[in-house]
Image (cartoon, coloured by chain):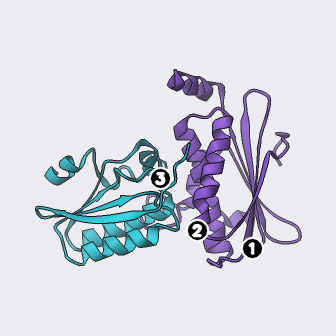
Chain colours: A cyan, B purple
């Protein structure tokens, strides 16, 4: 039924984009690590920060809060924050929190890079 | 209080540690599946419980990890089936009227938990627990239209 996973976070680069790719559940126990990794990536001032959620089967409001904070920092830095490759369950929490219209969301990483 | 009569099927006591949330979510999702909810709804019901537990850990217990939380889960045997989840703690009591969702137009980190719980569950009731702590009752009914949708998804 529910395969819970310990969160791992990978940082990758592609052109001018920095890509943060968490793998596993993002909840109250995992969100601080994601926040730290995104913050570290943002300190390099990339023009485009992509958060690839293809490996995230579950996210709660702690994860949403982390992404909202990252979006606010990106805006202050004149950078673009794009979220891509959401699984259906994760997309539904963005919709419930009515954040699906607030974030730039791409279907795939390729779409995010070309946005 | 709610009229749905059920006997608890599962009672769980957990420490107030974020690392234990995943196990609680898995249990809730499995029970919701027994109630006939589809995969997305099972995920959402476990999300609602996760949000309630996070609120207790963060606000009720101020992130102290040696406190206790009790979760009771029951399912009605009659159609339409409902899942009822009662979450209890021993945190400081707060006025029930103070527990409310915030304005979502104000986009900022945090404060979404109560909104998410209320969006997902049909019944959300907070009350004071005796002699101390809070009790939250959550109910979700697998309504006929939803149940049909679930059945179609399975075939």
Quadrant of the rendered structure where residue B148 is? top right
| Near-viewer residue (B64 or A55) | A55
Mark 2, residue position: B18
Q: Nearer the viewer, mark 1 or mark 2?
A: 2
Furthest residue toward left: A15
Give the residue pinned by disc 1: B91
**Residue at x 52% of width, y 66% of height:** A28
Q: Is residue B81 above or below residue A82?
A: above
Q: Secondary structure at mark 1?
A: loop
Q: Which mark is residue B117?
A: none
* Label 3 Cα crowd, 10 Å radius (few <14 / some 14-19 / many 20+): many
Q: Is residue B101 visible?
A: no
| Relative horizontal placement of residue A12, taking residue B52 as reference (left or right) | left
Q: Which residue is mark 3?
A: A58
Q: Disc 2: which chain? A: B
Q: Decide if residue A45 is in sight here.
A: yes
Q: Secondary structure at mark 3?
A: loop
Could you say where residue A55 lies in the image, as x and y percent from the top left? 37, 52
Q: Is residue B97 left or right of residue A34?
A: right
Marks 1 and 2, the one that precedes in the sequence: 2
* Mark 3 to mark 1 CA distance (whole Å): 27 Å
- State if disc 1 and disc 3 touch (CB < 8 Å): no
């Amino acid at each position: 039924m529910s395969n819970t996973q310990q969160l791992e976070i990978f940082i990758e680069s592609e052109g001018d984009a920095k890509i943060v790719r968490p793998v596993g559940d993002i909840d109250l126990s995992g969100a601080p690590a994601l926040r730290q990794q995104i913050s570290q990536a943002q300190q390099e001032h990339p023009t485009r920060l992509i958060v690839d959620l293809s490996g995230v089967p579950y996210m709660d409001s702690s994860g949403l809060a982390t992404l909202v904070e990252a979006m606010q920092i990106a805006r202050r830095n004149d950078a673009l924050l794009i979220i891509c490759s959401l699984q259906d369950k994760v997309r539904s929490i963005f919709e419930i929190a009515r954040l699906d219209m607030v974030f730039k969301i791409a279907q795939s990483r390729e779409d995010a890079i070309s946005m | 209080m709610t009229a749905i009569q059920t006997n608890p099927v599962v009672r769980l006591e957990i420490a107030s540690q974020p690392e234990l949330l995943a196990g609680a979510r898995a249990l809730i999702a499995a029970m919701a599946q027994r109630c006939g909810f589809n995969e997305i709804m099972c995920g959402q019901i476990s999300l609602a419980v996760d949000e309630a537990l996070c609120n207790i850990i963060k606000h009720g217990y101020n992130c102290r990890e040696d406190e206790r939380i009790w979760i009771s889960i029951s399912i009605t045997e009659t159609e339409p089936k409902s899942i009822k989840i009662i979450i209890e703690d021993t945190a400081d009591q707060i006025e029930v009227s103070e527990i409310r969702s915030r304005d979502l137009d104000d986009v900022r980190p945090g404060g979404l938990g109560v909104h998410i719980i209320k969006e997902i569950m049909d019944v959300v009731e907070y009350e004071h627990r005796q002699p101390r702590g809070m009790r939250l009752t959550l109910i979700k009914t697998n309504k006929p239209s939803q149940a049909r949708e679930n059945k179609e998804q399975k075939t």
